[in-house]
Image (spheres, rainbow, N blue to C red):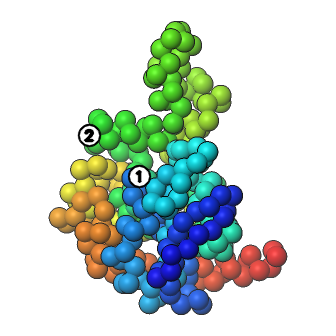
Amino acid sequence: MAVLWADPGDRVHYLDFGGPHDGPVVVAVHGLSGSALNWLAIAPLLTGRCRLLAPDLAGHGLTRARERRSGAAADRLLLHRFVERVAGVPVILMGNSMGGMISLLEAAANPDAVAGLVLLDVAGPFGRALPDPMVAAVFALYGMPWLGTLAMARHRAMPARTSCGRPDRSCGRRPGCRTGLSYRAASRSVRVPALLVHGERDRLVPVAASRTLARAHPSWRLIVLDGVGHTPQLEAPQETADAVLRRLDGESQAVQAARHRFARQA
């Protein structure tokens, strides 16, 4: 394992867990309040078949926030730059929780750069089963960071109250809002193969979130792990790795085809 720094627009810390250079490249994206260290348990189980890179998102791990914006849109841009300038396209994105949401958004925005997705307890639409209200509030602020500013700006009276009550009305004027409100549309537009893994005992993101995605994409496989919570890569690394490796076998041809396509374009 190598501890490295890259500069895709600004300094980003990441871990290179190694792996075969002629195999697929997997970029692992941690969730909110996590870091690249979240992949330590599963990394040795995967690197015999793929090269595994894990960046720290801004304000997490050793990557400083500095002047970067926070939120899904900003982290998606950081991930995009990392994939293009460090990992090399195409890659398979593996994300946990918010990292899964960011990975899905990147696959929708840049389909040629992403050959496949592995989404572990992905944050997103919750179907009919809602999470804890505090968790839902945190997810909303991450997807639409301007909501926090509006909530604190009561002295601005009617404009702020109106925007808070009807965020869709100000969507075109608020950074990050478009990302939050268009998550469902983005998820529907993804055409790459994906594996959904969800812990049956996840109390932060209900299994309904992954079931919603699976219904929208019948070709995506959903695996529910009994007795596992929100971080299957930490709680059940062997079961999770087995599922990922089975998926990698099916995606190797897609990765090679995408590489040839990029080579022709270059």
- Residue at 50% across, 84% down: 18
* Kind of residue at badge 2: Asp
- 40, 73: nearer the viewer: 40
Q: Which residue is mark 1?
A: 32
**Which of the two marks, 1 or 2, is nearer to us in this view?**
1
- Residue at 53% across, 9% down: 158
Q: Image quarter for residue 218?
A: bottom left
Label 1 crowd bin: few (<14), some (14–19), many (20+), radius 10 Å: some
- 70, 42: nearer the viewer: 70
Q: Secondary structure at mark 2?
A: loop
Label 2 crowd bin: few (<14), some (14–19), many (20+), radius 10 Å: few
- Residue at 51% across, 37% down: 144
Judge whether residue 203 can be spotted in this image.
yes
For this view, does 80 lie left or right of residue 197?
right
Residue 163: % across, % down:
53, 20
The image's mark for residue 132 is 2
For this view, does 35 lie left or right of residue 253?
left
Residue 108: % across, % down:
60, 56
Name the image quarter holding the C terminus.
Answer: bottom right
Residue 143: % across, % down:
49, 41
